[in-house]
Image (cartoon, helix red, strand yellow):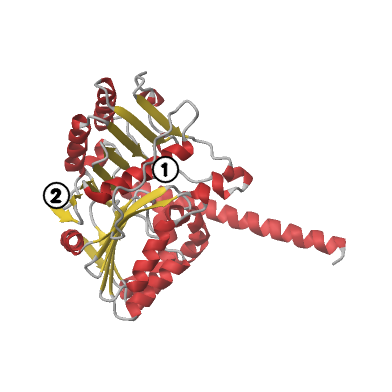
Amino acid sequence: MPRDSFRSSARTLALGAAAGLAAQVMAVAGIVAADNMRKRREPLTGEFPSTPPRELDVLGSRATVFTYGADLFEDMLAAIERATETIFFETYIWKTDEVGERFKTALEDAARRGVDVYVAYDSFGNLNQDPRFYRFADHPRLHVLRFPLLRLGLVLGNVRKTGRDHRKLLVVDGETAYVGGYNIGEMYATTWRDTHLKVVGGSAAWELQNAFIDFWNDHRRRRLPELPDHGARQWLSEVEAASNSPHRLLFPVRGIYLNALDRAVDSIDITMAYFIPDREILRALTVAARRGVHVRVIIPEHTNHVIADWVARPYYDDLLDAGVELWLFQDAMVHAKTMSVDGRWTTIGTANIDRLSMAGNFEVNLEVHSPELAAHMAEIFATDLTNCRRLTLHEWRQRPAWKRPVERLLRPLGPLL
């Protein structure tokens, strides 16, 4: 190709890319502005039905599912106050409000009474909080890992040095462990619908403790102590923690979702905060529905990230056309990350079905093969459905025509969300 023609083509491509980017920026700005007006005009009430916590016997562990934040936080704080040996605490968002202060005080008090306390939190997730809150008491038994704000892999193109610490874990004395979608803060206590799992004893607690130890040892600074890794006390394939680790290019959470979807025969129930399936997960869901599996997905009618809503919409046609049921949660943000299959398998954890969770962030999900837990999750799902409206294929295809080109314009943003 002649040099002038090459330059002309390159210039045309550059101009096209710039025009596309400008169009995306304008679309995002318009959507955000319109959503802010909607929130002022029709604010969420934050009211929703919840299923009371009930203790279950699951594979040698005592398991409790929490769907109301205030109940969960009181239980977690009580566990911290009872700790005698170790506390492992990890969160993505830690608000500097009354609830956040209670957790900070409880952790510092535990260290003062002789408990070895290890805390990990993500700096990016708390950028909009008062930084003075994260100055902890100087105590030899209190160790704090601040996951760094700057991840150079984003600049250098090194996938191993990207990802945020999106995990939410608490493990007390190696016997009581919690995992799920709840961040720490007042708004999560009463106005967000989320799901957290508590396990006491058995191999489930070790699975979550081991997930914390591996993360801590991989990312601690020299001044922080290394945690001993003693291996499993009991090896049960029926309960396992799947931990996404971008620095090792390991993303097993995505694998457990795909494996369960592929095996499904009767039913798939998903509750998901941000639902932007990649090609393989989209295919697994639609193939399952077409072979007769009853597939139901609960998502928020409006999330706290409106752009994620719009990026998800191009997938609705394929899902609804295949027979997947989409149920829109009303009046509150549903932030849960759960799936149950065939009344025998359940996963509860921190990973959304989107690009950042499946192949980007540090995440942890517990997968449990237990009819007892799956039956309880079915009760919770049924309760949530009473607060949902179903999005039909007919309604979806009747949406205003102007929305379709905007959806196509924003679809390339999917890998960033």
Q: Residue at the spot x=42%, y=32% of the render?
A: 145
Which residue: 55% across, 44% down? 161
Give the distance between the C-alpha atoms of the residues marked 2 and 1, in whole angstroms.
30 Å
Q: Position of residue 345 (x, y in %)?
A: 26, 64
Q: Between 46 and 211, which is closer to the camera in this rendering?
A: 211
Q: Which mark is residue 267?
A: none
Secondary structure at badge 2 equals loop
On the image, the x and y values in percent for residue 360 come to 48, 51
Crowding at dot 1, Cα within 10 Å, few <14 / some 14-19 / many 20+, comes out as some
- Residue type pointed to by label 1: Asp
Labels 2 and 1: the sequence-earlier one: 2
- Which residue in the structure is indicated by mark 1? 214
Which of discs 2 and 1 lies nearer the camera? The answer is 1
Disc 2 residue crowd, few under 14, some 14–19, many 20+, Cα 10 Å: some
Type of amino acid under label 2: Pro
Front-lying residue, 218 or 202: 202
Residue corresponding to mark 2: 53
- Residue at 31% across, 73% down: 264
